[in-house]
Image: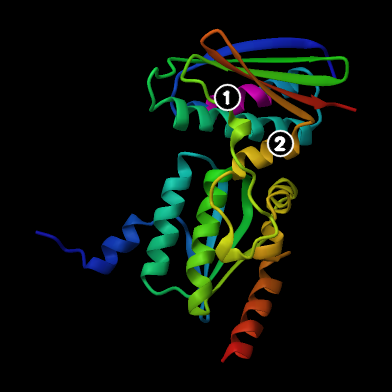
């Protein structure tokens, strides 16, 4: 006998802690994203997009390492959100993580904010303009 | 920076990149390397070893092991990655076009681009039946 609704199962399958602020979903990235954990990250982010999340903020303030396997997931998510007018933004990048983003040119194609407050303000402003 | 060297063997498995990163961290501490240098070397080795696992672990002759040697002397750190798989030169992979708009950005080639950018020199050679990639990073 299952007592879980499909939605509850979806929530249980998520590894990423998330918060909601208005229309924006905030996911907290922590620790290290490497060639193994990137698979979980991809599942979680794609699941959010499948569930209709259009404005996603990835709070990287707890993230201290990411390799190209994780960067690939960000690129896939951004490519998927752009045509539907969605927003993918990042905030709180530690110095080393920012260095990786800049070296791979992500600062030119993705939206980066210094902290969560400025990210929410910027994203709300962008969605108000688009509306 | 203190002179010295260390070496270790790794299996052809993605989870080994975590042990590899620990080894680089420990080497950095023992030899008093700058934190940023250690981060750049760790990431570059992670990317190159991931490439070997993905590319050489699935094609015959399959690689059986990876040997990593790290050394520091004369204001530089040298890392040598050796595997016994099919001939594979990671430097042949095309670099991503960083000026391309989002939808045209390729999801491949990012790892080798990061390694090339973070290291002062990367060279590849085929020695007998082994691939040898040597990375050099200056330490000021």
Residue under numbered circle 2: B116
> Which residue is nearer to you in this view: A100 or B86?
B86
The correct choice, above or below, for A36 with respect to B79 in the image is: below
Q: Is residue A15 visible?
A: no
Task: Say which residue appears at 48% left-offset and 46% top-offset.
Answer: A38
Where residue B94 appears, x then y in whole percent? 61, 42
Q: Which secondary structure type mostly characterizes the magenta part of the structure?
A: helix
The correct choice, above or below, for A96 with respect to B1 in the image is: below
CB atoms at circles 1 and 2 under 8 Å apart?
no
> Which residue is nearer to you in this view: B9 or B56?
B56
Question: Mark 1 Cα within 10 Å, few/some/many (few <14, many 20+)?
Answer: many
| Residue B18 shown in magenta | yes
N-terminal-most mark, 1 or 2:
1
B37 lies left or right of B79? right
Where residue B34 appears, x then y in whole percent? 81, 30
User: What is the span of residues highlighted in magenta in the rendered image?
Assistant: B17-25
Task: Say which residue appears at 52% left-offset and 45% top-offset.
Answer: A69
Report in which chain the residue with disc 1 lies: B
Where residue A71 appears, x then y in whole percent? 57, 51
Report in which chain the residue with disc 2 lies: B
> Which residue is nearer to you in this view: B32 or B70?
B70
**Residue B119, picture quadrant:** top right
Which quadrant, please, contains the C terminus of chain A? bottom right
Task: Say which residue appears at 61% left-offset and 45% top-offset.
Answer: B110
| Residue B10 shown in magenta | no
Can you name the residue that lies furthest to the top here? B128
Can you name the residue that lies furthest to the bottom here? A131
Residue under numbered circle 1: B20
> Which residue is nearer to you in this view: A118 or B127?
B127
């Amino acid at each position: 006998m299952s007592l879980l609704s499909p939605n509850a199962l979806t929530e249980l399958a998520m590894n990423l802690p998330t918060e909601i602020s208005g229309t924006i979903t905030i996911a907290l990235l922590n620790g290290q994203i490497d060639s193994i954990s990137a698979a979980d990250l991809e599942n979680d982010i794609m699941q959010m997009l499948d569930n209709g999340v259009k404005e996603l903020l990835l709070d990287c303030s707890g993230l201290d390492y990411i390799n190209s396997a994780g960067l690939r997931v960000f690129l896939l998510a951004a490519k998927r959100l752009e045509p539907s007018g969605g927003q993918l933004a990042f905030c709180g990048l530690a110095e080393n993580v920012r260095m990786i983003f800049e070296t791979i040119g992500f600062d030119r194609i993705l939206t980066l904010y210094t902290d969560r407050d400025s990210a929410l303000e910027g994203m709300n402003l962008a969605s108000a303009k688009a509306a | 920076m203190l002179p010295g060297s260390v070496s270790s063997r790794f299996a052809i498995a993605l989870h080994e990149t975590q042990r590899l990163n620990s080894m680089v961290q420990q080497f950095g501490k023992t030899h008093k390397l700058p934190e940023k240098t250690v981060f750049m070397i760790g990431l570059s080795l992670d990317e190159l070893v991931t490439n070997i696992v993905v590319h050489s672990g699935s094609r015959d002759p399959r690689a059986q092991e990876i040997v990593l040697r790290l050394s520091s002397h004369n204001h530089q750190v040298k890392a040598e990655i050796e595997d016994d798989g099919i001939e594979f030169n990671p430097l042949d992979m095309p670099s991503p076009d960083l000026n391309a708009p989002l939808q045209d950005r390729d999801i491949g080639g990012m790892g080798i681009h990061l390694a090339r950018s973070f290291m002062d020199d990367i060279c590849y050679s085929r020695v007998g039946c082994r691939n040898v990639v040597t990375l050099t990073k200056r330490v000021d």
